[in-house]
Structures are given as C-alpha cells and as structure tokens.
Image: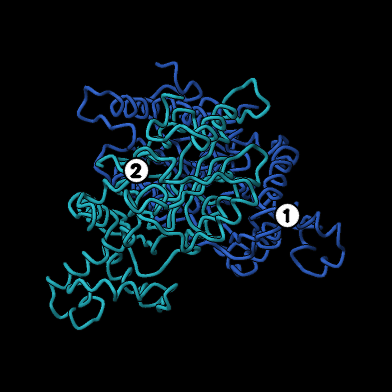
Chain colours: A cyan, B blue
C-alpha cells in the first residue's frame, strides 16, 4: 500500500492517516494546510511508550528511592523509602489517587526523587536509568519500550513538514532526557508536567535548580490545551492519545479552522503488549460520537516493539 | 565587509558577531557547535522593538481602557479608565513600581485589558492595534517600530541554522500576535510573561480563556533562565538584551559547554531613536567584567528603523 508506516498493517486505519497527511500537504486541494499550521501533538505514556505494569517514571522514582535508602539508611524510617527498598510495588499502587491514595503522599515521592538537584544532574540520572534499568516483563532497557509504529508516524509527519510535539502528563525533563535520541523530537517540542524551577545566582552565573512544588496546570486533561497554548500557540491538526487525560487535546484538534485527525490508541494486545481500557472509557465514547480514529494495537500494528 | 547585516556599520561590533557565527558553524574548527545547540534568545522591548516613551504594550492597554470607557461610561468612575480616556500619561507613569507605584494597581490595568476574552479574540485585538495605532513621535504604525539591524540579525542567525527565540518580559501572546509577520519568528519560539489561561469545555469543544492572574515566574531577571528551560531546555549560545532584566539571560549563555556571545544594546542615539541607560547600569558593568559585546545604536547601526 505504501512505503511509509511499514510497521502498520494495511487497512482502514493506516489508509485514514495516509489520506489525511496527503490531503493537507497537497497545495492543489482545498484541504491544504500551510506549513506553519501543521502541528501534531502526541501523548507519551501509553501512546508512544509503554506504561504497564506501571509508568516508566514510577520505576525511575522507585530506583531513586532505593538508591537513596542504600546511601543513607536513616531514610528507611520513611515508609516510601522502605517500600522501594523492599520492592513493595503494592505500596506504590495504593498511592494512586484513582485508587483512593492521598495525592500528597504521591507528590512526596515525586519531590524526594525529582527535586533537589540541577537540571543537568537530573538529566544525567534519567539517561542512565533509561539505558541501564530494564522492563520487568520484556527485560530490555526502558528506552527500547517505545512503539515502533508511533516512531514511524513521528518521522512520517516530520517528513511532511509537521512540527511534532510530545504533550504528556509525564515529567517534561524526564521525557526530554531521551526524546531526541529515541524519537528524534527536539527538547523544545516536549511538553509535560513540571516540578518548580528556580534560578540561583552563583559565582559561575545562573544555575537552574529543581524544587519541591508543581508548575500549574499539570499537563493532563484540561491542562493540555493550556500547555499547548503556552508552548505552541496553535491548535494541533493531528492529535493522538490513549486515555481520558487526552480527551481535551483530541477534541482541541477539531476546534481549529483546518481539517484535523484525532487518534485514540487502544491497548488490546495482551500477547505482544497489554490489554486494558480503564481510564479511557469516556474518550472511546467521544471518539465514536465525534469521528475520531481508533487504533487497535492488535490489528493495526504489524510490529509493536522493534526488539520483538 | 560582508553582504550580511547590511544595516550594521562595518567595525568591531559587526565583525565580532560575524566571526562568532562563522566560528560556531565551521565543522573544521574546535569552536563548532552542532545544529541542535545553536539557540539564540533575544529580548524584545528595547532590543528588537522600541520601548519609549513607553512600552508598546502600555499604549495598547491605554487604547483598550479608553475604548472600554467609551463603550461603558460607568467605567469612568475608576481612575485608570478615566486617566486613559483623558490621555493622562502621567497617571500611568506613576504606576511603575520602579517609580514608587503599587504593583497591584499596575496589575489591575493589565487584567482589565488583557483578560476576559479568548486567545483568538485577544490576538485579533493586538493585530488591529499594531497595524492601526501609531507611535506618538514617529507617526508610523507600532509594528514598524522594529530595529532593522536586529531583524537582519534574526534572519542571519536563522540562515545559519540557529533557532531564534524571543525571550521578553512582555506579554507572550501580545508578541506572538505579530512576531511571525514582523520578525519571521514562529509563535512557539516566542517566550514571555503570561496572564493565567483556563480551558473551558463548551459544546463546541475546549476553548482557552484569559483570566486575571499571572503565570509565575514572570519572564524577567531570574525568571528568564527558568522560562528558557521550560520552553527550550537548552542554554542559548547567542543572547541579546538591553537592560538589567536581561542580566541573568546574558550570563546564562556563558554557562554552557559551547562558545557563546552576549550582546548588550545601548540606547545612545537621541536623534534617530532615544538616549537612556536607567535600568541597565548593572548589566553594563557586568558586560565589561565578563567580555560581553556592547552594541551602540548610534555607532554600530547604519539604519535603526526601516521607515527612516
């Protein structure tokens, strides 16, 4: 069918994407969209990289807590350090506010592991983790846990003069630490949630420190259009997500003056990846009502991970 | 001397800029900087466009207040609406916190004129103002009040694969409304100060509303490195400013691993523009200590405004 998107199975979903891109890039069609308005925004967790059995960033947090507890055993008196040291995943599953957890306990885990260092130091930590720590089921470094069809889509959009942005509730610096290498997406096109930054003036000049605290709004749900406005200043004409946290962004693409496409990725392949739909029910319903394109990982993707 | 930067007089300043750009783009030199790290950050008010006798954005605010007072005379009971209606510039000069004004009064002016509408509505207002309202001394539309040498510098950097960002204490959406047209800088490369944004879900989908409130930190002084980190994720190797609000940014360029250049534009030409140095004394001192390049508008710029 096409030399593009070779990890996508031929069929209606792939054809819909190809047709859309061809129609907005053909100057002889009424659907043509000028280059400056070719904005794509893609969710990351569960859309471009794996998020099960837990967010990759949670695995990073646990590894940091454990390492800190090893280096300073007095930290073991705090339950989250002890739980990480003992590999007690249930403890952290219970922190999830959707599972009745206290958001303050979850934030404490984030602040203890993501704040108190410079941006450069944090970036190095993340790069080391993504390269050396391995996924518990697939036993490959986390930075290989990316969906090959989405990597091809990112490149295909770029070749058609789209500016492709990640727009995810995950940590902005966490994603930026590897996004150029694994996706070819430059740092300034990665939008995410942030802990507070502070400039400290030193004798060697200004240094950016990571501080406990969140920059509002977090990049999820209604916060996605706000952060898209702050970082891009244009509405996407191509949006992709996989959960209800993406609902606002997927709809935002339909509110502009140009043709648009919104993709909802469905996790329906327990053999090659995972099968779950908790937290995406509303968006699936809206996808049907508003004509969004539902992507089945099982049926639409020839390959999921490159290493498979 | 060169076909580039034709509005710059030949001399040491122009040669320093040309030499820097040539040295970081020549792959045979140790000073070579890879494309992804060629980041330039330029202040806007007083660096790329005129800021006297008052910030262009203040003229916009007064025009808005006046128009609102004309449409609703009950607003005349509020002193800032009355002052704007009567053209009382002294009233607004006294709001400046540096002149002993109350910052809350100044914020009220901003919130009354910059909030309470959608992003699209605000952008249209700014575009109309920049096209139709005229500078009181030069009698040209405000969007012509841009420094031709800086426009050439922006293009020259772009041709050398720099990503050029505006980074200004001025309003981000205010600048974005015209930056593509007047500078060729796309919206996502304009960083500034913001009032709060909020997503409202309507039957037609999410809409971004402008609300009273500021997104911290404002993009001035120590806030500039923070906003550069949020929007770019890299340190600039080329930075330009004209006041103490740029001090942190100009120094930031020197804290990276690559060669860098920091420019301080001096307003020293009362005939063709304005002469003032209040609020840039610290930065001028530091420029001498740290080897930054001081640009004299009088001596280094052949042309200041294209219309002259």
Say whether residue A99 is left or right of residue A217: left
Q: Residue at x 54, y 41 (%)?
A: A238
Q: Where's residue A109, x and y in %?
A: 31, 72
For this orientation, the residue located farthest to the bottom is: A77
Task: Please state the total of marks drawn on the protein image.
Answer: 2
Instruction: Looking at the picture, tell me which residue is in the foreground, B235 or A75.
Output: A75
Give residue B62's mark.
Answer: 1
Q: Quadrant of the N terminus of chain B?
A: top left
Say whether residue B142 is left or right of residue B192: right
Say whether residue B144 is left or right of residue B165: right
Classify residue B272 by image quadrant: top right
Say whether residue B297 is left or right of residue B233: right
- Label 2 is found on which chain of the structure? A
Query: What kind of element bears circle 2?
Result: loop
Q: Residue at x 17, y 73 (%)?
A: A85
Q: Is residue B190 above or below residue B117?
A: above
Give residue A304's mark.
Answer: 2
Q: Is residue A116 above or below residue B176?
A: below
């Amino acid at each position: 069918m096409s030399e593009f998107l070779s990890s996508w199975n031929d069929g209606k979903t792939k054809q819909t994407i190809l047709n859309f891109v061809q129609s907005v890039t053909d100057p002889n069609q009424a659907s043509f969209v000028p280059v400056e308005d070719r904005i794509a925004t893609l969710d990351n967790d569960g859309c471009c990289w794996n998020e099960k059995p837990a967010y990759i960033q949670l695995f990073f947090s646990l590894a940091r807590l454990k390492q800190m507890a090893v280096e300073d055993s007095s930290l073991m008196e705090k339950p989250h350090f002890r739980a990480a040291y003992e590999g007690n995943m249930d403890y952290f599953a219970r922190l999830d506010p959707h599972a009745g957890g206290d958001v303050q306990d979850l934030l404490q885990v984030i602040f203890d592991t993501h704040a108190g260092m410079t941006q450069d130091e944090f970036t190095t930590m993340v790069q080391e983790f993504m390269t050396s720590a391995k996924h518990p089921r697939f036993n490959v470094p986390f930075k290989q846990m990316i969906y090959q069809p989405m990597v091809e889509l990112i490149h295909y959009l770029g070749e058609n003069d789209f500016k492709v942005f990640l727009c995810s509730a995950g940590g902005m610096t966490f994603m930026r630490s590897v996004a150029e290498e694994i996706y070819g997406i430059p740092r300034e096109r990665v939008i995410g949630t942030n802990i507070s930054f502070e400039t400290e003036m030193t004798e060697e000049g200004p240094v950016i420190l990571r501080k406990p605290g969140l920059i509002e709004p977090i990049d999820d749900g209604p916060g996605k259009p706000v952060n898209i406005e702050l970082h891009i200043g244009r509405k996407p004409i191509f949006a992709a997500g996989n959960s209800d946290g993406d609902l606002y962004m997927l709809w935002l693409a339909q509110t502009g003056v140009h043709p648009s496409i919104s993709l909802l990725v469905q996790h329906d392949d327990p053999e090659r990846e995972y099968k779950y739909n908790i937290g995406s029910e509303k968006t699936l319903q809206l996808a049907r009502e508003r004509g969004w394109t539902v992507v089945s990982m099982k049926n639409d993707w020839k390959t999921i991970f490159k290493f498979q």
